Image: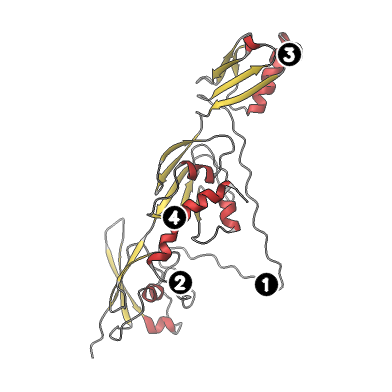
Amino acid sequence: MSRPWLLAASLILLATGAVAAQAPPRPTPAPSPTPSPGRAAPPSVTASPDAPASPAPAPTPAPEYRLGAGDVLEVIVFGNEDLTRTTTVQTTGSISLSLLGEVPVAGLTVSEAKQKLTSLLARDFLVNPQVDVKIKEYQSQFVTVLGEVNSPGRKGLRGRTKLVDVLVDAGGFTPRASGEVSITRAEGTFEGGANVLRLRFGSASPSAIDQINMELALRSGDVITALPKFYVTVEGEVTRPGRYVLDGDLTVTGAISTAGGLTRYGKNDVQVRRVDSETGKTTIIPVRLKDVRKGKKPDLPLLPNDVVTVPRRIF
């Protein structure tokens, strides 16, 4: 089955597939972590074993395109070639036509503009006129695409434009992209009242949710940002010290497992060095692995650029 989101999904996989290649799979993290300050905990969902699975939410229909200044229209009056012409919506919101003069069309859909022109011609000039209106150039509504895409910049909205259309127009993600997209809405809000929506596309085959997210309807003024990959560093007495992609809710024990676990000399009292990106202040957070494994202490979720240090035991 060929659908537009498949093309964008394949572009996404080029970037997100690199995440799995850089780090081996992590084991299931230990007890549910308590979020650190500044990082919200993911919502918990409890499903009853007898309750039927909830169907995936239907995508919100894209709003119909409304004409604006700069749009180039082709107005066709069948049987009256002298009235047929290509015209541009001016800054006043009007188009100029023979017989009718200046006709306001800004804010109308194509079908509404067609109906308006038909009514005006029928009222004073023609008997049963047949009018058609087509958009030759979309020049009035735009979104902005930023971040890790191959062709960032302002992209024109063309009719019922969806997220997949804009991502394809932007050339897909770069290898540095994390697969997470942030959409900031300048006019209006998303369902639920939020102005910012974050979507993450997995590195496996597109899921039903991925498909729905790809079909998200965009509005003029939306800013789409393809977020980069973030990293943490694991150093000291681990099997494979190095820099690892911060994928999802990575915790201290998860990062150590990704780095191959402790060496025989690794100490259970580890440290997380965290630098506040706004103030530059460095904080050292002690983590006792034995307490985390026993459920006595939460497994600290990591933030971008955290450094996990595993000291060497002194015998």
Disc 3: which residue: 122
Instruction: Report if the CB atoms under discs 4 and 3 are less than 8 Å apart.
Output: no
* Left or right, 232 with reference to 249: left
Q: Secondary structure at mark 4?
A: helix
Q: Is residue 194 visible?
A: no
> Mark 4 vs mark 3: which is more N-terminal?
4
- Above or below, comparing residue 295 to residue 37 in the picture: below
Disc 2: which residue: 34
Q: Position of residue 104 (x, y in %)?
A: 59, 19
Q: What kind of residue is marked 3?
A: Ala
> Mark 2 vs mark 1: which is more N-terminal?
2
Disc 1: which residue: 48
Disc 4: which residue: 14
Cα distance between the residues tagged 2 and 1: 24 Å
The residue carrying pointer 1 sits among few (fewer than 14), some (14 to 19) or many (20 or more) residues within 10 Å by Cα, namely: few
Cα distance between the residues tagged 2 and 3: 69 Å
Which quadrant is home to the C terminus?
A: bottom left
Q: What kind of residue is marked 1?
A: Ser
Mark 1 or mark 4, whichever is nearer to me: 4
> Mark 1 vs mark 4: which is more N-terminal?
4
Cα distance between the residues tagged 4 and 2: 33 Å
The residue carrying pointer 4 sits among few (fewer than 14), some (14 to 19) or many (20 or more) residues within 10 Å by Cα, namely: some
**Residue depicted at 56% across the width and 39% down the height:** 161
The residue carrying pointer 2 sits among few (fewer than 14), some (14 to 19) or many (20 or more) residues within 10 Å by Cα, namely: some
